[in-house]
Image: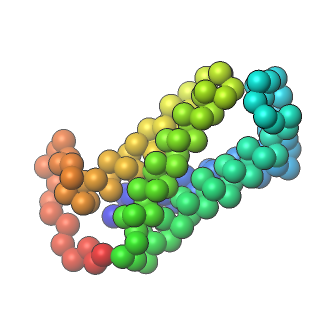
Amino acid sequence: MRALFWMLAFGALSALGGGVLGVAFNGAGVPLEYLQGTPFDSYIVPGLVLGLVIGGTQAAAAIAVGRRSRWALLLSSIAGAGMLIWIFVELAAINEYSPLQTAYFALGGAELATVFILLGILRPAINLPAVRGSGG
């Protein structure tokens, strides 16, 4: 659960930071040409979605995991899936590639895989000690 917490906390902080950069600095150097063919003429709306929706779900999940809430794994799966969807939509909409997209796609995938391991749906590739008293 600790690894899941740190992945989510990182995802929350970076999405919130990216959202602030998108809104306050209109993409912070990302060319506006990337938005051609999208419904957006600035990075304000995408920045709000990134910061509030993606960052918000990542933060809510991190808080739930930290508190060992019964909703922690559900919120974590929503946050991980949201991160994957964000990257898919971004790639489809702007038709540009950055290695950061791969990194954040991997983060969302790792969050989901960790949830599936904790639920017993997946088995880790390495033999990890059993988690005891994880709450719920």
Q: x, y (%) of residue 96?
A: 65, 22
Relative depth, front residue between 45 and 25: 45
Q: x, y (%) of residue 32?
A: 83, 28
Q: x, y (%) of residue 93?
A: 66, 29
Q: Quadrant of the C terminus?
A: bottom left
Q: Please give left or right for residue 108 compared with residue 59 in the image.
A: left
| Residue drawn at the location 61% of the way across and 27% of the way down | 92
Relative depth, front residue between 72 and 24: 72
- Whether 102 is drawn above or below 83: the answer is above
| Residue drawn at the location 28% of the way across and 78% of the way down | 135
| Residue drawn at the location 40% of the way across and 77% of the way down | 69
Res 95 quadrant in image: top right
Res 31 quadrant in image: top right
Relative depth, front residue between 12 and 50: 50
- Whether 85 is drawn above or below 101: the answer is below
Relative depth, front residue between 14 and 115: 115
Q: Please give left or right for residue 110 compared with residue 63 in the image.
A: left
| Residue drawn at the location 37% of the way across and 57% of the way down | 3
- Number of marks: 0
Is residue 7 something one can see in this rendering?
Answer: no
Q: Quadrant of the N terminus?
A: bottom left
Q: Please give left or right for residue 35 compared with residue 9 in the image.
A: right
